[in-house]
Amino acid sequence: MSVRFWAVIPAAGVGRRMGGGDRPKQYRQLLDRPVIAWALERLLGHPRVAGAVVALAADDPYWEALRIQRGADQPIHRVDGGAERHDSVRAALAYLAAVADGDDRVLVHDAVRPCLSAAELDRLITEGGEAADGALLATPVRDTLKRSDGAERVAETVPREGLWQAQTPQLFPLGRLAEALDAALAAGAGVTDEAQAVERHGGRPRLVTGEPSNLKITHQADLELAAAVLAAQRAATGRDEGPA
């Protein structure tokens, strides 16, 4: 059996930094659908993605109303997430352990990155799909970086050479990522993304060049920027990059 790819979307958070609105940012409306629907469609639009697992808050009142449906050959499963991102990802991996092989790959993607292009997803799968330590989309840091002294003054300029800004999806062998997350949790180590867990476990994930347009919605202004990106993508292709 060939290696399959499974989408994992941790979406149990409430997005307090966003402010305003009556619902978490992954459920805010973006053009003609919620943000999380865009994220799912971009992943499931790739022919090698076998299905998705979405980790949600146990009391999430919004998901069922979306009625996002796929065919039986590309199912979307729901699991209860946890208080932290790594808890939600680990819950999704536990579910997949019963339906996938340990050598299958998972694509962990932020629920609030709706602008992932087909080209960069395909590049990640092509260039990183066979990497034993996994791979992630990232972009080289281009701007000058300043470190604050804690009082909104510059303490120092940080060299940007060799620095990359991590994005998602982040792609790993299912078993490799599960082991790395378990080791981090057992050590009480906080990890901010999956690549950091694999790094702690001795891995060196591959960096695959992403696109600046693959933005993460954190603030209200990001919604407006994402809408502009999606509209430009539609104009360029005559369609959405993922299936409706």
Image: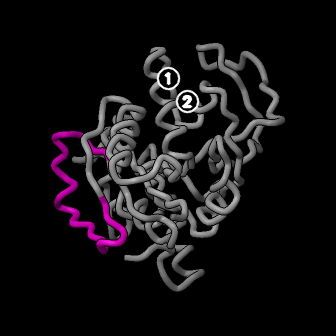
From the image, state whether disc 1 or disc 2 is nearer to you: 1
Residue lying at 19% horizontally and 40% vertically, measured from the top left = 58
Most foreground residue, 198 or 109: 198
Q: Residues within 10 Å of mark 1 (few under 14, many from 20)?
A: some
Disc assigned to residue 183: 1
Secondary structure mostly taken by the magenta-highlighted segment of the chain: loop
Task: Please identify the residue farthest to the bottom as the structure is shown.
Answer: 238
Q: Which residues are magenta?
A: 55-76
Of the numbered discs 1 and 2, the one sitting upstream in the chain is 1
Q: Circle 2 is placed at which residue position?
A: 197
- Position of residue 207 measured from the top left corner of the image (x, y, whole percent): 71, 46
Q: Is residue 179 above or below residue 234?
A: above
Residue lying at 60% horizontally and 80% vertically, measured from the top left = 236
Horizontally, is 89 left or right of 238 in the view? left
- Position of residue 9 measured from the top left corner of the image (x, y, whole percent): 40, 49
Judged from the image, the secondary structure of the residue bearing numbered disc 2 is helix
Q: Is residue 56 above or below residue 27?
A: above
At label 1, which amino acid type do we have? Ala
Disc assigned to residue 112: none
Residue lying at 63% horizontally and 68% vertically, measured from the top left = 119
Q: Is residue 1 visible?
A: yes
| Count of all numbered marks drawn on residues in the image | 2
**Where the C terminus falls, by quadrant?**
bottom left
Q: Is residue 64 magenta?
A: yes
Q: Is residue 25 visible?
A: no
